[in-house]
Amino acid sequence: MKYSKFVTPIIEIAMEAGRIIMEYYGKDSGVTIKSDKSPVTKADVAANEHIVKKLKSLAQEIPVIAEESVNKSSAETGNVFWLVDPLDGTKSFIKGTGEFTVNIALVDNGVPVLGVVFVPVTDEIFYTGQDGHAYSRQGSEPAEIISVRKTPKSGLVVVASGVHRTKETDDYISHLPDITGFSVASIVPASSSLKFCLLAGGEADVYPRFGPTMEWDTAAGNAVLLAAGGRVENIDGSIFTYGKHAFKNGNFIAWGTRPDVIRH
């Protein structure tokens, strides 16, 4: 694997950032509102500073695009760059639900080739391994290879945003039986990059996202899902890529094992 030398360091960096975040968790974290109306806390900023500093030390030649420090209007990346969300799920962090993550991804020619998603509250980590497989590990337990599952005969488990679920999302879910030939068995709400990790770990089958996201929200989870055998598509079925204008994502569908899709 071309970038295998970065796997262990970025796991360590993500976990260090998680420990920084936990120093603020459940305390007065100094919530302010950014120009895009989203909240930011002292934990976001502190974790962001730590990750950016460490990544620049790790590979000075690779640009770092991080949520709390990038100038989206002028940032230049080249073909290879880091995408960082130091605290994905800030609203969940503020509410104290525990459903927030540290996301670090490496993008090469539009494809997220390495990714780490760390869950500070549970000490669980999902990542792309040096061998190209997807792995998960909790605490001091041994790491295990994870992979997507075949769609069960009992029907699709759909994972959807617990905060940003739209009417378009519900409409798409209602049409999944016609689109895939499988019934919908259940809909699981989840926050942050955990939605991708549920697919990668074989606990869910599809994650439709209609609504605004940024590339640093999705790149790490996307990398893990790809390594686990899954796929992320634009609505027209084309491959979802990175390095778009202002790092803004369009609508997308993430699949575990993608059924044959009849497009209408």
Image (spheres, grey):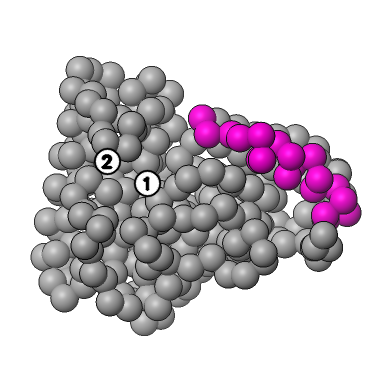
> Residue 226 placed where, x, y %?
54, 65
Location of residue 59 (image quadrant)? bottom left
Q: Which of 186 and 248 is in front in this view?
A: 248
Q: How many circles with numbers are drawn on the protein?
A: 2
Mark 2 element type: helix
Q: In which quarter of the image is the N terminus?
A: bottom left
Q: Residue at x 71, y 61 (%)?
A: 257
On screen, residue 88 versus residue 196, left or right, reads left
Q: Residue 18 carries which label?
A: 2
Q: What stretch is highlighted in magenta?
A: 163-181
> Residue 156 placed where, x, y %?
77, 46
What separation in Å lies between label 1 and label 2 (alpha carbons)? Answer: 7 Å
Q: Residue 118 carries which label?
A: 1
Find out whether the residues at labels 1 and 2 contact each other: C-beta distance under 8 Å.
yes
On screen, residue 127 versus residue 181, left or right, reads left
| Vertical side of 41 occupied by 147: above or below | below
Q: What residue type is labelled 2?
A: Gly
Is residue 164 in view from this perspective? yes
